[in-house]
Image: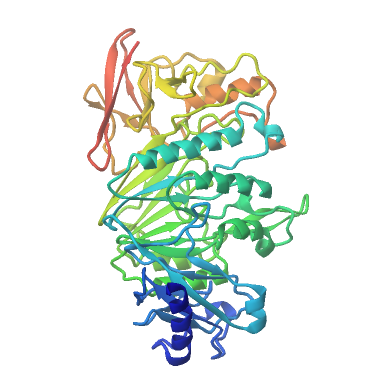
Amino acid sequence: MRELFIPILTLILALACTPDNGGYNNGNNDNGGYTPTGKITVKGLVYGGGSKALAGVVVSDGLLCVQTDENGYFEIDSDLSRTKFITASIPSGYSAPTDENGLPIFYHRVTDEERANEMVQHTFEFYPVANNPERYTLIVGADPQPRARSAGYDNIAYHSLDMCEDFYLDMKEKAATITDRNVYGLMLGDIVHENMSLFTNYVAGLKTLGFPMFNILGNHDNDYTAKNDTEGRRKYEEYLGPTYYSFNIGKQHYVVLDNLIMKIRSSDNSLRDYDQGLTDEVWQWLQNDLQYVDRSTTIMVAAHSPMFMGIDMSERSKHTQGHRTDYAALLSKYAKVHAWAGHAHTTFNYVYPESSNLKNIEVHTVARSTGELWTNEYAINGTPRGYTVVEVDGDEISWYFKPTLYQRNGFTGQTDPQPEYKYRDYDFDENGEAKMRKDGAKLTESYQMKVYKPGQYHNSYDEMIAGNAANKYVYVNVFLWDDKWEKPKYNGATMSKLGHKEAYCLATYEITNHYYSYGYKLAGGNEYGPGNNNIHTIFRIYEPNPKGNGTITVVDRFGNEYSQTINW
């Protein structure tokens, strides 16, 4: 009976209902070059489980946005020649149905037949969430970026496909421990590395997670054999759906953006170059979507490439970032904005000062979850493989770093011996589980920093390369540190923060220098080893004693204290 009810009601409402907004809302905007004609080509209904009509749900054709009326009805004057998807912004308190792979389906893919008939008719149905909708966990990963096992730069140390499998397992097990709230995922792009066949591996991994994953298009997710930006993202769309969209969880409004405009690289005629920013169409859609969001709302905006402050402490160029000035001005009007991104392969959290017109915005750049790009070992700033766990309770948002426990597949590189890993605090047992060297305990989220003993670090990267004597400082790398944390303390004394241009990561250097000594180099012949890599999370303090011990403690911005004791 239910199967007959929706189509019949859809037909009745399609004939009888005329929404108050006239089918589209363009405000003072130019709608990306499209002038509505008055001809309705998209119509449908939104339900919230059973036969409950959902009013006020925002539905979009990728450019125009409308709200459903009191009957859950919507219609859009859409140009179907350019419309790929009809999306519904999942309303707070509801979840989207998932497909056989666990992907949330909040969109309808427009068919060739619908284009020919100039009519799309679709019913969206969402389901009330079982737990408190305002209390949830968000698992945020970035740049898993697997390559084929035969890829040259994937044979240096560990296979990226193996590290992806460990990453998926860790996320699955982490989510399984969370039973008192709903769990969602956000993957910040570069889901594959220019190999479109590996989307099947990624989707298979998602199927195991047990929670819905919202995905973002990265530059390496584009087909480099395509001729333009539109063609480049077709494989992504085939597997994962639209490349920009919005949804709501609890009190937060999420906006996912495609902020890389792909273009042909002249040297090899491949689609590998890009401009960073929003196309006119995405910018217009963003305005149309946010006009329905109250300014008191916290916005979680996510894109592959950082949209605001970069790791080199320079603003994204207002000249090379399409509509950067525009989207910054728009987002600055909201109560709070958390801007999430990957792409840089390193951790960077930044809080704009009160003096800035962007003081409501916080930047969260998440390191590559499967490690450094070529070796799949540490991330470039020494952060272990892992991801960020965000806990939300109403308006309260907190987060912490979750290191990946597993390394189940062995070393596949061609160097003998392997690196010594003398700066790593854990080893992997016969089951591929990371165990802390100090006590044999499993590697967990209690591990939020890496401490270095006196006599290990040098004052600068150049001094280390020159072979000068190491200094007498204790160093610590606090993975997710930002200005709202307390500075770490050593035996009660406050440590000094190193500038991002003078800091370097000793753990990463050990790994990369090992492979460089065997002749591995990056594309273009650059040395395989980091210099000063814009690291914002390293502190130090003088320790003159030739032997001793000490305890480093740090309190994060949420009041959690972490500590680590060293002996030398």
**Quarter of image, res 126:** bottom left
Q: Residue 24, percent across and down? A: 47, 83
Q: Which residue of the protein is positioned furthest toward the front in this rendering?
A: 1
Q: Is residue 537 above or below residue 242?
A: above
Residue at the image position 55 percent from the left and 86 percent from the top: 36
The residue lying toward the viewer, choosing from 497 and 245, is 245
Q: Which residue of the protein is positioned furthest toward the right in this rendering?
A: 268
Residue at the image position 49 percent from the left and 52 percent from the top: 102
Q: Residue 226, percent across and down? A: 73, 58
The residue lying toward the viewer, choosing from 187 and 356, is 187
The residue lying toward the viewer, choosing from 365 and 104, is 104
Q: Residue 87, percent across and down? A: 49, 69
Q: Quadrant of the C terminus?
A: top left
- The mark total stands at 0
**Quarter of image, res 41:** bottom right
Question: From this viewpoint, is residue 349 visible?
Answer: yes
Q: Is residue 263 above or below residue 561?
A: below
The residue lying toward the viewer, choosing from 178 and 257, is 178
Residue at the image position 43 percent from the left and 40 percent from the top: 172
Q: Residue 259, percent across and down? A: 54, 59
Q: Is residue 97 left or right of residue 152?
A: left
Q: Quadrant of the N terminus?
A: bottom left
Question: From this viewpoint, is residue 534 visible?
Answer: no
Q: Is residue 264 left or right of residue 95?
A: right
Q: Is residue 145 above or below residue 297?
A: above
Picture colour scheme:
rainbow
Q: Is residue 17 above or below residue 264?
A: below
**Quarter of image, res 409:** top right
